[in-house]
Structure formats: C-alpha cells, structure tokens
Image: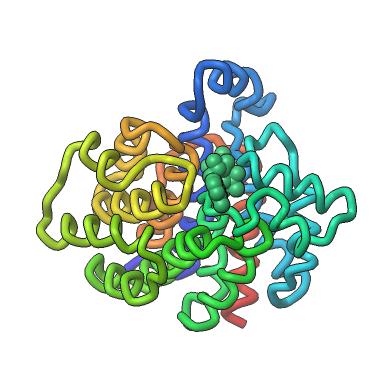
Amino acid sequence: MINLKDKYTGCLLGLAYGDAMGAPYEGGMIERLVWRFIGKTADGCRRWTDDTQMSLDIAESMLAKGALFQDDLAQRFAESYDWKRVYGPGAAKILKLIRRGCSWRDAMHSVYRDGSFGNGAAMRAPVLALFFYDSLDKLVVNTRAASEITHSHPVGIDGAVLIALATSQLLINRSKEEVCEVVVAHCQTEEMRKPLQVAVNWLQQNNRPVVSVVVAQLGNGITAQKSCVTALYIALRFIDSGFLDMMNFIIDAGGDVDTIGAMAGSLWGAFNGSSGLPEFKIEDGARIEETALRIYSAVRC
Ligand code: AR6
Ligand code: MG
C-alpha cells in the first residue's frame, strides 16, 4: 500500500511532469520552436508552464496564510506571471491588470463578461485536494474560490471542481467507479455532464477506444469542457499502467498536451505515488517535492 506522504509528492510531481513532458508538443510550429530554445534549464532540466506555477502559487499562499485568501492568491498569481510560462491569453490579460493595481474582482470580468471557461482553473485544482482531501464540502468551496480569480464562468469552475474531487478520491485509494460516482454527483453544468457520461460509460464497459475517438468525443482543447473529462478519462484508463504509457497516449491525442498532461499526471500521481513516477530531470524538482511535503505536514498536524 502506498503511503499518503508518497501520494502527496506523487500528485504534485505528477502534475509538473505531465506539464513539462507535454509542453514541447503544445501549440503550432512557432510555439514549438520557441519552446526548443526556452524549454530547458542550463543544467538540462525540463521546464514547466503556468499549470505548475499557479499550483505552487496556491500552495505557497495557503501555507503562508494558513487558509485560502483570494486577495493574497490573486497577488501571487500576478507577481509570478511570466510570458515564458505560456499562460492562456485571457488569464495573461487578467494577471497583467492585477499587477498594475486593478482589483481581481474587476479584472476577472475584463476579458469575458461571464468569466473564462478555459481549463486554467482546473489545471491548478489538484493542489486544493492536498489541503482538503478529507472534506468534499470544504474542497468544493475552496476550489471555487481559487478558480474564480481568473475563471469565474460556471464551466471553468465545474472543470476545476471535477479535477479536485477526482484527485481527492485517488489520494484515498477509491476505485475508478467510486471516483466517477463522486464527480458525477457534483457536476453542475451540461457542458461537463455530456462528456462525463461518455467517459463513465467507456470505463464501466471497459471499452478502450483509440485515441482519435477519445479526441472526437471528449476533446483536447484549452477550454474546460474540452479537456477536463479527457484528462480524467485517460488517467483512470491508465491508472494501473506506467506513467509514460499514459503520457504517450496524451501526446498522441495532441491539442492542449501540457495541461491535459498536468491534470492526468496529478491524478495518476495521487494514486500511484512518487515512487511510481519515472526518472525525469525537472526544473525545481526539489522545491515541488518539498512543497508537497510541507502541505502534508500542515494538513496532518
Ligand atoms: N467566451 C468565449 N471564449 C472563451 C471564454 C468565454 N467566456 N472563456 C474561455 N474562452 P483563458 P486559461 C476560450 O484564456 O484557461 C495555457 O497554455 C478562449 O478562446 O482564460 O488560463 C494553459 O496552460 C480563451 O483564450 O486561458 C492552458 O492550457 C480560451 O478559452 C490554456 O492555455 C482559454 O481561456 C488555457 O488557459
Ligand atoms: Mg500550460
């Protein structure tokens, strides 16, 4: 049985590994070319993107403050913003506004009046499960609060809640069926419910469609409705296989590879622990592991 401490580091490192392994396949020709120049540190470690940066921001804010404070978190998101981390276009604009002194409550509606339904809130949601895995109610409330700073659209929030809940269930060794039950019960939007039903049926019937069918039915895009269920489905399908087998499937699926990789990577790592992860030279690996251990100590004390 994998111990909870190993699952904490597995979850956060899995997120960063999936992000960094997927990043070279993200975007068109130009983006990939740019990443070839900036995607590695001087000592050859693979860099991660906004998925991991914003997860670390949440962890560091909550560890410093002892709880989730949206004002502090918004400030940290804005201060960490760096174009080289390939933020989503809407999130980038919101964070630059906050940096210039705009309140996050005003900034969050400045790009989309109804808020963003990008997958940017879901990609950073697993870290909330590390803080609240033992209370579904607290996990949902805090995930919503951490999401709405940049993603206040109900679908953006629904995706984040789905990923956070699934992470929490895998941390406590729930079966695929139990994970599905919990996420279906909390799903609030039709946009998320539709692909979720498809994925649940595949998992229940042990139907293993080829990658093109997965992409056609669940999506591989940068919106929450086209990526969160995809990541959940792939993580559960590969939960008893190797991390690299899962990542190869995600890379074949294409599209938003780094964020689908980050979400699926954290789910896989929450279940299998860091001892199951492959050898991989990642930027700031020690900081990521230490952050997971600091959350573990804070939560378990
Ligand atoms: N109306 C129309 N289009 C929308 C709306 C809306 N209300 N909300 C989102 N979109 P964004 P993210 C579309 O920009 O979610 C990075 O690489 C719109 O096309 O908020 O933070 C991350 O790592 C918008 O540009 O970004 C993620 O992989 C897009 O959804 C990815 O980008 C994404 O929303 C998304 O990050
Ligand atoms: Mg990214």
Q: Is residue 143 left or right of residue 176?
A: right
* 18 or 157, nearer to the observer: 157
Quadrant for residue 220, please give it. top left
User: How far from the left and from the top, in percent, is residue 282?
Assistant: 57, 38
- The C terminus lies in which quarter of the figure? bottom right
Residue nearest the observer in this picture, 9 or 216: 216
Is residue 220 shown above or below 274? above
Between 273 and 268, the residue placed more toward the observer is 268
Res 40 quadrant in image:
top right
- Please say whether residue 265 is visible from this viewpoint: yes
Can you say whether 171 is above or below 38 in the image? Answer: below
Residue 297 position, x and y percent, is 62, 73
Residue 37, given in percent of the width and then of the height, sits at 64, 18
Give the number of marks. 0
Q: Quick check: 225 above or below 89? A: below
Question: Which residue is pictured at 40% across the width and 48% down the height?
Answer: 227
**Quarter-wise, where is residue 168 in the image?**
bottom left
Q: Is residue 290 visible?
A: no
Residue 149 drawn above or below residue 31: below
Residue drawn at point x = 48 percent, y = 60 percent: 155
Residue found 47% across the figure and 47% down from its top:
223
